[in-house]
Amino acid sequence: MQSGAVPVLGEPGEAEFELPAATSADVFPSDFTWGASTSAYQVEGAAAADGRLPSIWDTFSHTPGAILNGDNGDVACDHYHRWREDVALLAQLGTGAYRFSVSWPRILPNGTGPVNAKGLDWYERLVDGLLECGIQPWLTLYHWDLPQPLEDAGGWPNRATADAFVRFAEVVASRLGDRIHTWMTLNEPWCSAFLGYQLGMHAPGRRDDALALRAAHTLLLAHGRATQALRGIVTGARVGIVLNPTPVQPATPTEADAAAARRADGYFNRWFLDPLFGRGYPADMLEAVAPLFTPPSDSDLRSIGTHIDVLGINYYRPTVVRAKPGAYLGFEEAPPDAEPVTAMDWVVRPEGLRELLVRINHDYPVPPMAITENGAAYTDAAPTDGQLHDPERIRYLAGHVDAVAQAISAGVPVTGYFVWSFLDNFEWAWGYGSRFGLVHVDYATQQRTIKDSGRWYQRLIAQQTA
Ligand code: IFM
């Protein structure tokens, strides 16, 4: 932790820098991990550098009309070239851990076949740089950038993609396993499967219910088998998966909306949590998707249910649904109600995080959990004189840190919290307009400016680790 070495920014007593009440009440243990997250395609840029070939996101983001304003990740935050400056910023913030993902097409440009040594060398430099600053690397293997040749061969609906993923995991673990303790296999497989293959909003932009269900299954299988492979290579590895579960509420107290909420909970949450914790796919959901999905073998389910050491939870907002006869699973998301919303129209509801953690801990035999992403996009003004005031983001983060504290006080094992995001970055279909960072990025000059929220987070970490 570097906070002793740098001045803590933000003056005590300034209202906008106030820390959540819970943080002064000794709720967070001294070994609690305070971190920040990014992912490869969203920050690295350098899309064609050192042997990297296109992923599905390179293809998708260059498809006319797919991304707001025609943005793409070719340059992004140029983290690939500016990583030293970025590690120094993480150290300045005092983060104890940095969660990043490895770009599969940098390591295995064709998805399978020859390993690209230059890609591995880059991650080794990044990891060593983090460790030199006392920052623990939390590595995510897959944050959505499937090598395009694997998509051309059928993508995630194709079982062979699970084999390719296991090899990718083995290659990365063989090189970095001596330095990295915490390994996450997948980030938000719901998004990869359903935003990517059912709703067409994310790469590869397909719209097919059956393909999406098969993709979800291959992703879970890939996770289970890679978890076993990682354990065989990395002694003492802590291995887990990152999900984006959401508390689902019915729009009205009618029976129809309550039933819709139950199905939506199956779609967003139980379809992933049940098999991961050894229960197989939920019976009500199997029945609902029966014509589209053949129940898998016991052997697949055993692989998916492989024990995990940590469960990553990404939380941004709750989901309100209402019945919609004829729609897939008979529900649709209701528009945000009167509560405050972020610039992306996402309802701000910190209690949703507490409820979610309590519920998951109650319903499943969970290992320790970490909040691997939490944050908000607001329309930040450009920095002036090296400052950027973002009080709404501070309020959002403070409310959610409080919610985590309440969950811990209620007995839920939460051992870490990571802000999404360390840097403003490429927000997928929303392009660069949606800024989540603790650190502002001027994309024209690549100038970084710590926002007030970054200064606030620095104070919080300094207080918690003093
Ligand atoms: O930017 C994304 C991230 O890649 C995955 N989780 C949600 C974030 C905000 O949309």
Image (cartoon, rainbow, N blue to C red):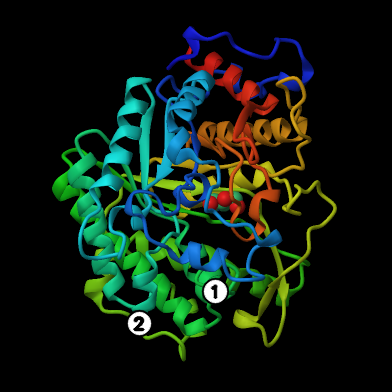
425 and 189: which is toward the camera: 425
- Point out the image quarter for the N terminus: top left
Vertical position of residue 266 compared to residue 311: above or below: below
As drawn, is 313 to the left or to the right of 147? right
Vertical position of residue 319 compared to residue 432: above or below: below
Q: Which residue is mark 2?
A: 295
Residue reaching furthest bottom?
291
Q: Are marks 1 and 2 in contact (CB under 8 Å)?
A: no
Query: Where in the figure is residue 336, as x and y percent of width and height?
Result: 78, 58
On the question of residue 279 being in view, the answer is: no
Residue at screen point 26% across, 57% down: 168
On the question of residue 318 being in view, the answer is: yes
88 and 299: which is toward the camera: 88
Residue at screen point 27% across, 45% down: 118
Residue at screen point 41% across, 64% down: 274
Name the kind of residue labelled 2 in the image. Pro
Query: Where in the figure is residue 292, as x and y percent of width and height?
Result: 46, 87
* Element assignment for label 1: loop
As drawn, is 77 to the left or to the right of 227? right
188 and 200: which is toward the camera: 200
Q: Number of labelled discs? A: 2
* Element assignment for label 2: loop
- Cα distance in 3D space between marks 1 and 2: 25 Å
Q: Which residue is mark 1?
A: 205
Vertical position of residue 213 compared to residue 369: above or below: below
Dot 2, crowdedness within 10 Å: few (<14), some or many (≥20)?
A: few
Pointer 1 or 2: first along the chain: 1
As drawn, is 86 to the left or to the right of 460? left
46 and 455: which is toward the camera: 46
Query: Where in the figure is residue 329, as x and y percent of width and height?
Result: 60, 80
Vertical position of residue 168 compared to residue 354: above or below: below
Q: Nearer the viewer, mark 1 or mark 2?
A: 1
